[in-house]
Image (tube, helix red, strand yellow):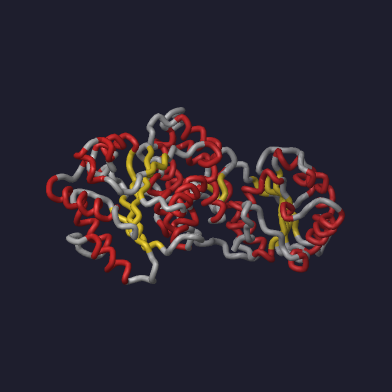
Amino acid sequence: MTPALCDSGAPAALPRELAAAPRLLVVHAGAEDWFVRGALLPALALAPQEVLATSQLGLGEMALQELERGIERAALTVVLLSHAFVADVWSGLAGVLASHAEREGHGQVVPLVLHDVVSPLRRVAKRSLDLRERAQWPRGFSRLRALLGAPEELPREDLPCPYPGRRPYAAAEARRFFGREREITELVQRLRAGAREIVVTGPSCSGKSSLVSAGVLPRLARGVFGMPPMIVRTMRPGIAPALHLAQALGHPLEDPAATLTSLLAEHEPGARALVFIDQLEELFTSSGGAERARFLSAVRSLRQDERCTLLWGLRADLLGELEQSELWPRDPSAGPAAARWLGEPQVSRLPVAPLRGELLRAAILRPAIDAGVVLEPGLLERLLADAAEECEPGALPHLQEALVRLWEKRQGRVLPLTEYQARSQGRPRAAVVAAAR
């Protein structure tokens, strides 16, 4: 087990009565918190109450007293020697730690050398561990486990990957979906205001399907004040759009009004139907003939029924195809041929742009934090920079797939920068695509 994490990703504070007698005390600079949480503590597999780290302490007299108690009572004290440590507030306590190392009955002090720095601990301590190279970590952690009386080898921790790779996020993954809060709120507010037909449109692979499936639909499932319960059905047109719509609704399409009545009768009174037709572009690129005509006829009937709301997901480059198709409501003032469209609901559009900047940062970082995993310093900025340089418009699926590959190669609970650099082959452009292969 590793120390519990709060929402920010920092270790949660330990109860003072438990932290006073830890098995392990970790003295480190704040800049090395990623190494402590992501590599060191998972490798030792101690319970939270068995660990005290200086990152859990504030400043002041009480913190110094607690640190002194920890030094005296801990079975093992490790000090991370790094460039950041020598400039950190805790480095001034190195002399105190060195003197305690010479006393019998006060446990052991072991410096962990992350960088080649000068410290009195390296001269006084009976042993130190050289962890400057990543390949030295497993052996060093094994020696620490031996000092703590822990098992020599630990099984690899089975952590489900929170990133979907090249596919969209699904409703079951809503808690891992970040970066689209504004669009989710906007779409839900439109539905609450009475919009009955909305086209979610944007470039290919910009996240339209994820926005609706993992963002909007789970929020509707939890219930929205001022809205009736929504019975959600999802489909893609494919080559047989009428068949897929009938399967989604669970009833034949010969009489769409009767179909809606049958569907809603299976649920609580007052419920409404919401049909999400994703990848609408397939209607124009894959289907045709009688099957397409049946689908269009059914949709025209559904859109006229106030018990039904339609959401469309459509590539922006095919928006013109939709506007020229029989699906698009006609202006009755355009002439007698368009009069049959009178009374149909207005279609509104919600544009979805590719994630960038802080929104993309949240989409990368928050799933890892929630899983208790850290990104090695430099990796997040490198991913953001490479995604910004990506030539293809659909960089997001490549980025998510690159994160899946990094998850498979994680070291403890660290997503390694070195692995990404190796996979991206140092390419200044299309690096995310290369890392995803």
Residue 112 placement (x, y as % from top left): 68, 48
- Looking at the image, which residue sits at the far right? 61
Q: Which quarter of the rendered picture does the C terminus lie within?
A: top left
Observer-nearest residue: 249 or 383?
249
Residue 176 placement (x, y as % from top left): 49, 54
- Left or right side of 339 for 159: right
**Does residue 422 appear in this view?**
yes
Point 68% across, 43% down: residue: 31
**Does residue 408 appear in this view?**
no
Residue 224 placement (x, y as % from top left): 49, 60
Residue 325 appears in which quarter of the rendering? top left
- Left or right side of 322 for 409: right
Observer-nearest residue: 55 or 70?
55
Observer-nearest residue: 322 or 57?
322
Q: How many marks?
A: 0
Observer-nearest residue: 59 or 327?
327
Residue 389 placement (x, y as % from top left): 46, 29
Q: Which quarter of the rendered picture does the N terminus lie within?
A: bottom right
Point 68% across, 44% down: residue: 113
- Left or right side of 409 for 107: right
Point 48% across, 36% down: residue: 421
Residue 153 appears in which quarter of the rendering? bottom right
